[in-house]
Amino acid sequence: MWRVVLKRLLAALPNLVGVVVITFLLTRAIPGDPAAYFAGGAATMEAVEQVRQQLGLDKPLIEQFFRYVGNLARGDLGLSLTTGQPVLKELMARLPASLEMVLLSLLLACAIAIPMGVLAATKPGSWFDQLARLITTAGVSLPTFFTGLLLAYVFYFLLGWAPAPLGRLDPIFSPPPTVTGLYLIDAALAGDRALWWAAFKQLILPVATMTIFVLAPIARMTRASMISVLSADFVRTARASGLRPSTVLVRYALRNALLPVVTTLGMVFGFMIGSSVIIEKVFGWPGVGSYAIDALTASDYAPVQGFVLTMGILFVLLNLLVDLLYVLIDPRVKIDA
Amino acid sequence: MKPPDANRPPLLTVKDFSLEFRTRSGTVSALQHINLQLRKGEIVGLVGESGSGKSVLSYAMLGISDAAARITGGQVHFGGMDLLKAEGAALSDLRGREISMIFQSPRTALNPIRTVGLQIEDVLRRHAVHTRGRTGPDQALGFRERAIQALREVAIADPERRFNAYPFELSGGMCQRVMIAIALACRPSLLIADEPTTGLDVTTQAAVMDLLTSLAREREMSTLFITHDLGLAAEYCDRIVVMHAGHAVESAPTRELFRQPLHPYTALLMSSTPTQSSQLHSLLPVPGQLPDLRRSDLPPCRFSGRCSRASEQCQQPLPLLDAAQIHAVACWHPLQSNAAPEEIAADMADRLAAKSACEVLQT
Amino acid sequence: MSTPLSTLGHIRHVLSDNPVTLVAATLFAGFMLMALLGPSLVPFDPLATNVGPALSPPSGAHWFGTDALGRDIFSRVVVATRLDLGIAFSAVLLSFIIGMPLGLCAGFLGGWWDRVISRGADTIMAFPLFVLAMGIVAALGNTVGNIILATAVINLPFYIRVARAEANVRRDAGWIEAARLSGNGNARILAMHLFPNALPPAMVQVSLNMGWAILNAAGLSYIGLGVRPPEPEWGILVAEGAQFIVSGEWWVSFFPGMMLMLAVFTFNLLGDALRDIFDPRKRT
């Protein structure tokens, strides 16, 4: 099995390299003179030249690339022009906010979409099946910013159920002591129930928005996979042996059907990371996405590039994780390297 | 061992059973007026071409038919209960415990991501409540031990280790043994074996069949052996029921059937089945094709279209196969002569050719 | 090969089987109409300010209400159709024109071609695609042209894969051998034989991509990239109305958002219908 794991790890390497290469090319693709840009608007000619030499922008491209990689290895993603802080530091500080939202949405989406898919598969063509199809197609057609705004309007403005979309916490609360950076976990660890609840309430709307968006691929995959598995020979054998319908459905059919769903999760992560940027803007969520947008609007490019690079690497690692998870749960893969 | 006493009351009785499929391209009349009987300890072969309805019948008896299936008449009595009228829960209790089934393509018929030992345990646990009352040497053991015992009984070597094996790690023959172990774990009184040897090589075929029949005899378990291979049925079955296009056309003890086939189709089947002594050139195909079962204008005898003995009378509703008879046939013109099947078949082929020639000349 | 008549019959069968598809087709026609004739259909100049009281709710005079500058939202939403569909269409077309030949080469010629092209497609897909689009627009500059380019780039892998798969399957087919033996060069085989066969699944992809490209372009506009105000574009219109949602003026964002959703929905349904026509086996 370890050989298979190693193979998967090695397979992820070219993607990591690709991510780094493309991000590097993007940094050099800025129109105009990058040195002048990095030196800042008010710099003099000498200052620009100094920056150019400092950043090695006068050297051949290949050398610049290796410099870039060297910087990356040291964790140097540049400085933000607007805040003057190292980009990496700011990204790391804001990453937990984004992660908390994404992870919670994933859990919720699976909790809804998988049973939905299973139910639709056991009764194909029924009204439930059609309804599920409609809901999921609508969910994926709705732009996330629109869903977010609608939810904010209905649940905050009209019904007053949800709090104002002001970020992770109502200003009267202060964040819990940092253990993971995920407020729900940290507040639970600190035993602060009021704080936990406050953090949870702020999460509801952004998480709901993202969940609606990713329901479709998960539900569709579950449904298709389930339909295929339910007509498989071994399910017929299980039925013929008198196993209870619930046993057949869960232990025999669902476990097999979930395998392709796990591989879908990789793609789903990509959608989630992309839509998290927009959702953070809608709800003023202090994550990496809004960080990048703010920098973009201020023409501060280093954070944006750092953001693209980080998200790219994160995505490759997430896909690798999904791959490894699959190796663990499917016994056939251990031999079939 | 000698076959059981024919005077015992039957364990399974299928009476006038009819079933159809609703499909997009029409209603398929898959089974019509099937009569069948199985006694305790008997091994009965259900023989017929693909599409004759043999598997459909067994699925319907077990209650695992396709969703498009509609039962249009008849009864299936087992142990004092009409299976067709039984509730889902009651049927589910019976399956695997009193009536079991094994299928072809054993590797795909087993759960690919669950160890074979656990699959046997699943069945044991499911029926544990019911089998508790039974006495037996394995009552005192736990489920895992009983599963290992089941593997041992189907002659799988090193059962403790094989318990943790996955189906893809086992050969086709071993997978079939595992399936037999699953089916027989709760000591059912009836086993339905649906083409269990198809897809296996000849040596493995013989081994699996030997295993099945020895287990059946040991436990006095009735077996319905479904196959398209008349030769295989001849070797292992006490009695054979021949099916054609959804009808049961003949039923007789094996020896009797081969000594004197009564239905023309049976004779044709025999002459197209290779035996040890037959030569390739002496094998005759069964002429014509199965009728399209979606048609609503099918004649009462579905073989009449390609039978050389067909006459006006064959348009009359068929005499039903009387399952209580020792040698029963559903035909207006059963074969009488004592000629060998090959001769009968050759004769039929000639007559059919002559008949078609006449028809052509007449148009 | 199916005859034109039987294809028509098949299309009719799919349409009647699935009334939703008919709805999608109608909507598609509607959007085409708005895109082509938009400016001549609307009552007000989409850029004219103060044609009505600012932030007034939907009424008889202003079906979709007015925004903070007193502009008629209905006019803006309808006219925006041209820009949104135009951007999406251009991006998809560009993707198609570049991606299909690349994929066909990769699948048919194999070897080095396949390795390089597949590696390129995989690298693009190694990114969360929206993030990559952001990066490209940020690097190249905040223009509509770059939005189109960025959207085209992130859609490339889909076309490369579709074309590659189709070419791969047919690579060793008998009739391809025959074509080669009768003197056709590789380029000719690719263009005349493989490309037409790859079209049906590519068409399905195109329709689905259109929906996604529209969402992408709107998303980029929403966060401030690409189209700049006061140019009417659905994403920008929603962004303009976002601040008013929390104070109750819902119509400023609602109608552009609905139109956006309707457009994406239409193309998704259309893609499903095309899939049913060309390959009923792939129905999900």
Image (cartoon, coloured by chain):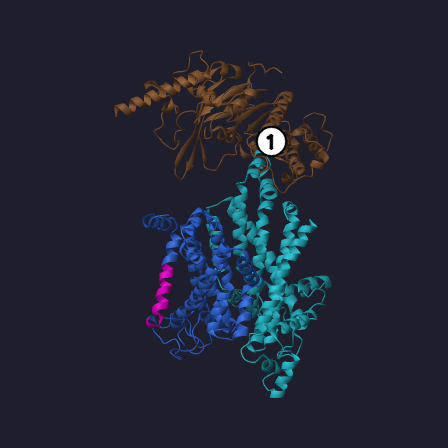
Task: Name the subunit of mark 1.
Answer: B
Disc 1 residue type? Answer: Gly
Report the residue that reaches farthest toward the left. Answer: B363
Q: Colour of chain A?
A: cyan
- Can you say whether B314 is above or below A306 in the image? above
Residue C29 located within the stretch drawn in magenta: yes
Which image quadrant is residue A63 in? bottom right
Q: In the image, residue B323 lies at what x, y percent? A: 48, 18
What residue range appears in magenta?
C26-40
Q: Is residue A161 visible?
A: no
Q: Main secondary structure of the magenta part?
A: helix
B166 relative to B357 in the view: left or right: right
Chain identifier, brown in the render: B
At a point 59% along the width and 16% down the height, the residue shown is B4
Chain identifier, blue in the render: C
Quarter of the image where the C terminus of chain B is located? top left
Which image quadrant is residue B125 in? top right
Towards the viewer: A198 or C216: C216
A260 relative to B321 in the view: left or right: right
Quarter of the image where the N terminus of chain B is located? top right
**Residue denoted by label 1:** B96
At a point 74% along the width and 29% down the height, the residue shown is B140
- Can you say whether A238 is above or below C114 in the image? above
Towards the viewer: B119 or A59: A59
Residue A87 located within the stretch drawn in magenta: no
- Can you say whether B316 is above or below C145 in the image? above
Report the residue that reaches farthest toward the top. Answer: B338
Which image quadrant is residue B249 in? top left
Q: In the image, residue B184 lies at what x, y percent? A: 63, 29
Q: In the image, residue A20 lies at what x, y percent? A: 62, 67
